[in-house]
Amino acid sequence: MTLDHHGQLLAPVDSQLVPPSAPIIEQIRRAKSKATLRFRIVFLATWLAIIGTLALALAGSFDGGFVSEWLGYILGGVGITVLVSVVSIAFAVVFAMLGALGRLSNHASIYAAASLYVSLVRGTPLLVQIFFVYYALPEVLPPVAKVPGIYLGILALSFNYGAYMTEIFRAGIQAVPRGQSEAAQALGMPERTVLRRIVLPQAIRIVIPAIGNEFIAMIKDSSLVSVVAVQELLWRARRAGAQDFNTFEALTIAALVYWALTIAFSLVQDRLEKRMARGDR
Amino acid sequence: MIPTRRAAYLAAGLMLAAACAGPAATPTPAPTAAPTATPPASTAVCDNLPAGSEGDLLATICERGSIVMSTDPAYPPQSELTSDGKYQGFDISVGQEIADRLGVELTFETPPWDVLTAGSWNERWDFSVGSMTITSDRQEVIDFTQPYYYTPAQMAVRADSGITDLAGLAGKVICVGEGTTYLFWLEGTLDFGTETPQTTPPEGATATTLPTDRDCAEAWRSGREDFDGWLSSATTVADAVADGLPVVAVGDPVFHEPLAAAFDRSGPDHDQLLSAIDAIFGDMHADGTLSALSNQWFGSDLTQKT
């Protein structure tokens, strides 16, 4: 029980401990749940008030006909947005795993290569990387030119996120108690097997919530691949908006859809984290 | 081991759920069939392949049974979208007519404009029917057919600007699309070869660019005032006016540009295909097909040189 801020209840009265009577505890409990309820009501009311005000302010310049005509077409891009995000995060995990092992390696050259990867990728803008893969890479590597934009977009996204997630994976691997690998080694397990069977499974469990966060960020960053003609959510919204000068409506729709997607995946992630936390008990 | 395996299942489940969350993804929309007359099958180019076409792009597309055209549906009325994701417009109809007369299917790629004019398409698409102006600079990387129509370049201003002629834009900022002939004209580098326009930009006017021509008008619509002029195709300006934007045309067209189908110079051999499409354009000029399409999409016949 966290009654510490009601200190007088726990404080000795007349230098002897008086156990608080049941009705008082019940009263406090009720007061607390009432306060919680009030907090939630005010929270909800504030959201509704702000969103309602925004909606009313914007409604005047919002062309409803555009929504009924183009919403379906724009929503058709959600599939590609989610597909690009899912595939990119999967490849990013591979890049991050390799990067983390490299960053933890005792071989100077492997450590150096992994560090260069992280430094270079984190030190340059994602948009520059996407442009580079699509426009510049084919100059030196002609076959790349025939690769459709969607694959190059996925390559750039996963390469970029892999560098950021390298540090997450490294922390995850280091968070596995040393005793685990020491115990395995004491049993005579070869180093590679220790890594594969003992360390990595525990590390992955530690980093899964962080991967969820990265995935949600990826959903938003995947909009950047619209610049290389990948027909995802933003590309479709921009083109639909260009038909009759409805950029305002188109971008509003795109923003709301991205918001809904991130909320939905946040909920999934919350549940996932709760499931994971159960194992820690 | 069990919590770890459960975690793996959960992760897999999350990925699967995510993959299923959206409708099926199709990166390329289906081509639109344009409402044009199909010539008798026997006249299709692919059914009467000229001798020596082996190894030419013409033989390749005939064998493949389809030709890939680049387009960007951000340019109504040349290339626009229908709400079910299909393409239509003047350029789309012309492309469809070319494909019909070649005797192949028409499919699309949607590269950004500056990628198109820069050449080095690396066979991502076969040709462009994208209202591209024939300029000397572009001819270094692009091979052009004969023009299929000509558009006037029209200056426009905000309706409330009080500017009534070209001279009123002296010293002002003029918005143009990236990599367009309108930008080259303002910078003084526009060069059609022998037919280079003799007009000059308003004294001291400078250019600012946005990704497409229509973005300039869109910026005015949203109330931006960072520029006073907008130079684009007369068809685009007319479309903006028709859509109720606060835009008016000022002055006579500053130049007329010849627009042609384009091929990548660095691409596979395409002499035969280029001359086949050149001949098709000749026929389409002569039999009135181009005039009819121009009237359909622009409300006027822009197929004759002015």
Image (tube, coloured by chain):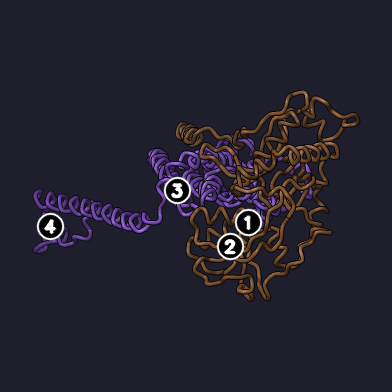
Chain colours: A purple, B brown
**Local SS, label 2:** strand
**Which of the two marks, 4 or 1, is nearer to us in this view?**
1
The kind of residue tagged 1 is Ala
State if disc 1 and disc 3 touch (CB < 8 Å): no
Badges 3 and 4, same chain: yes
Distance from disc 4 to disc 1, alpha carbons, whole Å, reads 91 Å
Q: Is residue A31 left or right of residue B215?
A: left
The kind of residue tagged 3 is Ile
Distance from disc 3 to disc 1, alpha carbons, whole Å, reads 31 Å
Q: Position of residue A149 (x, y in %)?
A: 66, 43
Can the viewer see residue A169 in this picture?
yes
Badges 4 and 1, same chain: no
Report which residue position mark 4 lands on.
Answer: A17
Distance from disc 2 to disc 1, alpha carbons, whole Å, reads 8 Å
Badges 2 and 1, same chain: yes
Which quarter of the rendered picture does the C terminus of chain B lie within? Answer: bottom right
**Which of the two marks, 2 or 3, is nearer to us in this view?**
2
Relative depth, front residue between A75 and A159: A75
Report which residue position mark 1 lands on.
Answer: B234
Report which residue position mark 2 lands on.
Answer: B249
The kind of residue tagged 2 is Ala
Relative depth, front residue between B38 and B20: B38
Q: Position of residue B181 (x, y in %)?
A: 71, 59
Q: Is residue B267 left or right of residue A69?
A: right
Q: Crowdedness of circle 3 by 10 Å Cα count: few (<14), some, many (20+)?
A: many
Q: Position of residue A192 (x, y in %)?
A: 64, 38
Report which residue position mark 3 lands on.
Answer: A253
State if disc 4 and disc 2 touch (CB < 8 Å): no
Distance from disc 3 to disc 4, alpha carbons, whole Å, reads 62 Å
**Local SS, label 3:** helix
